[in-house]
Image (spheres, grey):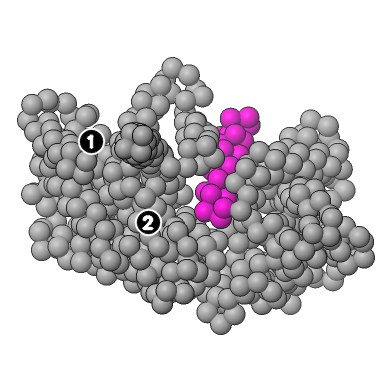
């Protein structure tokens, strides 16, 4: 069973790797690049929501930190590889510090506090990006050049794809490690995990830092793909994207986040096109919002989660049948 | 001196508006253990419906009443359809109320268009008084008076009536209240509606105060209200008014003296409270 899934992953990965050489479409290439970047972002969110059971409403803050760090480095210094690497390092350090402090402040309290405080803090970052005009150029944002290595769209597509696969592999390894198991235990039953002797706060902070750093890297790739950054990377919309992707795809399953990212990005693309047909499609967020509410209410496990459940039920039934046979 | 008085009045008025939003949040949280992320959406709906009714009927009183009614109805529907199905599951509650917030503010744009709408106070509240060389804007005094009135009324209901007794008992131990034969579901509904009504009232009064209304202001004020709820203490009604005044006044002074730091100060205040007194200044629950 697990082997079959692995084969499926490899086939999909190879297909996506070959795709740009077989089928030439600039729009599709750019769209898929976006999907990969948001898949990284959604997976990082899944570590929090799906694996640890923490709700964050300020995930855009880490995304934005990454997006602005690369922008500022490429603009203020030179667009070369050493500065790129430095920007990656700075992103990792900054997001780690912010998520560490936030986690330490609020994760010992009820889940509401983390949701609230992250919402408030991402608001603070948005204001900071708007006000700190000498560096961020305010609301208008700024364009920047990127190192030659990343200039080609196909190359950048491959880089994003490989990054996504690497992040997926790392996070999958992480979630099935003893540490990841403890996180899932916290999600299932906090008191029991604590009474088993685990320091909940420690584990939650670790999850928050890992998730924050990954989100920062996604943001870095995002603004590199646009070669432009403005305050929109800090807005609620980005957080909502992550929420929708993880919930529709399936919480607690990293693949779900990737599938969700694909679905949302494509739906986004189509609905924007449809806006020319009827004005109601300009307000496409409303459709997403309604789908999201219905998903939380009736479909809380998402696509992948529901598929897994169906499969589990089927194997259980078969086992039962086999047992009955033996018994009779 | 006149600057100081004006800044204090301004801060008090903003504080009262935040209080109207935060009071509902804190009461709902205290009683139902639900943190309603859609509260800002109800606030914005109050603002839009109030402004719209004022523009069509020309009567400010009807506008205020209409806005409160909108809030009550939306509160009823929200409690019935959105909160009740996911009752008891914190993660789902947080997620679903945020979704509702999004839908509410997008619906505003569908109904009234995505642009800002200007709003003005009625003639008898426009203008200002002059006391010596201090100019006092009438509308601000009106907001402060309404805020104090609402606070007094709710405080009276909580302390001196049977329903208030049930609510206070429910905050402490809702299973026990239920065991005593009181239909707590009905109380939940009522408190949620009143909270929503207060938020809508706050929104309706904000319109003429700031001059323009827009769909995103719901979220902006909701963030301030969250800060207030954290500082004042989750579930503490008197805490919410004191913290709201604190946030309002510090915001108005900082906006005048150090404009770039005005939001940061509130955040800092919240961080300090969270470190040293995580249950809030007046909170009972952690």
Q: Position of residue A227 (x, y in %)?
A: 23, 46
Residue tagged 2? A51
Query: Callout 1: helix, strand or loop?
Result: helix
In the displayed structure, B162 sits above or below B44; it is below
Q: Quadrant of the C terminus of chain B?
A: bottom right
Q: Of residues A191 and A175, which is closer to you in this image?
A: A191
Disc 1 residue crowd, few under 14, some 14–19, many 20+, Cα 10 Å? many
Residue B52, quarter of picture: top right
B237 shown above or below A216: below
Q: Is residue B108 magenta?
A: yes
Residue A32's disc number: 1
Can the viewer see residue B49 in this picture?
A: yes
Asked where in the image residue B224 lies, by quadrant, the reply is bottom right
- Magenta region, main secondary structure: helix
Q: Looking at this view, name the residue that lies furthest to the front.
A: A328
Q: Which chain is disc 1 placed on?
A: A
């Amino acid at each position: 069973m697990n082997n079959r899934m692995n084969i499926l992953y490899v086939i999909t990965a190879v297909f996506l790797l070959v795709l740009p050489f077989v089928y030439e479409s600039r729009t599709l290439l750019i769209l898929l690049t976006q999907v990969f970047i948001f898949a990284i972002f959604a997976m990082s969110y899944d570590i929090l929501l799906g694996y640890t059971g923490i709700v964050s409403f300020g995930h855009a803050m880490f995304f934005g930190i990454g997006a602005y760090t690369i922008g500022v480095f490429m603009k203020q210094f030179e667009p070369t590889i050493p500065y790129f690497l430095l920007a990656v390092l700075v992103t990792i350090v900054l997001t780690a510090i912010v998520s560490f402090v936030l986690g330490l402040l609020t994760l010992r309290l009820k889940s509401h506090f983390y949701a609230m405080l992250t919402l408030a803090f991402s608001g603070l970052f948005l204001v900071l990006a708007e006000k700190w005009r000498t560096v961020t150029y305010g609301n208008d944002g700024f364009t920047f050049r990127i190192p030659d290595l990343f200039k080609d769209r196909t190359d950048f597509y491959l880089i994003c794809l490989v990054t996504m696969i690497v992040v997926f592999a790392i996070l999958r390894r992480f979630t099935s490690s003893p540490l990841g198991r403890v996180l899932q235990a916290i999600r299932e039953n906090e008191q029991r995990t604590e009474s088993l002797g685990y320091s909940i706060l420690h584990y939650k902070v670790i999850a928050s830092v890992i998730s924050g750093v990954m989100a920062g890297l996604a943001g870095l790739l995002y603004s590199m793909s646009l070669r432009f950054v403005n305050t929109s990377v800090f807005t609620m919309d980005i957080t909502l994207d992550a929420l929708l992707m993880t919930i529709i795809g399936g919480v607690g399953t990293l693949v779900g986040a990737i599938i969700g990212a694909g679905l949302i990005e494509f739906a986004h693309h189509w609905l924007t096109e449809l806006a020319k047909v009827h004005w109601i499609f300009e307000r496409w967020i409303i459709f997403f919002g309604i789908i999201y509410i219905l998903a939380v209410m009736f479909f809380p496990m998402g696509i992948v989660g529901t598929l897994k459940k169906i499969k589990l039920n089927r194997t259980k039934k078969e086992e039962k049948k086999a047992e009955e046979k033996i018994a009779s | 001196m006149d600057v100081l008085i004006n800044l204090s009045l301004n801060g008090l008025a903003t504080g009262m508006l935040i209080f109207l939003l935060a009071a509902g949040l804190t009461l709902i949280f205290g009683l139902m253990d639900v943190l309603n992320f859609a509260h800002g959406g109800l606030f914005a709906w109050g603002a839009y419906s109030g402004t719209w009714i004022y523009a069509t009927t020309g009567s400010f009183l009807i506008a205020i009443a209409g806005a409160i009614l909108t809030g009550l109805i939306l509160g009823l529907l929200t409690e019935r359809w959105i909160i009740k199905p996911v009752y008891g599951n914190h993660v789902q509650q947080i997620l679903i109320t945020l979704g509702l917030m999004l839908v509410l503010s997008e619906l505003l744009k569908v109904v009234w268009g995505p642009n800002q709408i200007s709003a003005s106070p009625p003639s008898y509240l426009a203008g200002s008084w002059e006391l010596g060389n201090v100019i006092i804007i009438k509308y601000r005094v009106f907001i402060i008076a309404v805020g104090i009135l609402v606070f007094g009324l709710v405080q009276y209901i909580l302390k001196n009536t049977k329903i208030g007794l049930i609510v206070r008992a429910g905050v402490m131990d809702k299973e026990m209240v239920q065991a005593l034969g009181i239909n707590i579901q009905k109380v939940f509904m009522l408190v949620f509606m009143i909270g929503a009504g207060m938020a809508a009232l706050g929104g309706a009064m904000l319109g003429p105060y700031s001059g323009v209304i827009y769909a995103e202001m719901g979220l902006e004020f909701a963030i301030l209200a969250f800060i207030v709820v954290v500082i004042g203490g989750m579930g503490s009604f008197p805490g919410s008014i004191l913290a709201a005044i604190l946030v309002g006044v510090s915001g108005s002074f900082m906006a005048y003296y150090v404009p770039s730091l005005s939001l940061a100060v509130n955040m800092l205040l919240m961080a300090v409270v969270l470190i040293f007194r995580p249950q809030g200044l007046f909170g009972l629950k952690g």
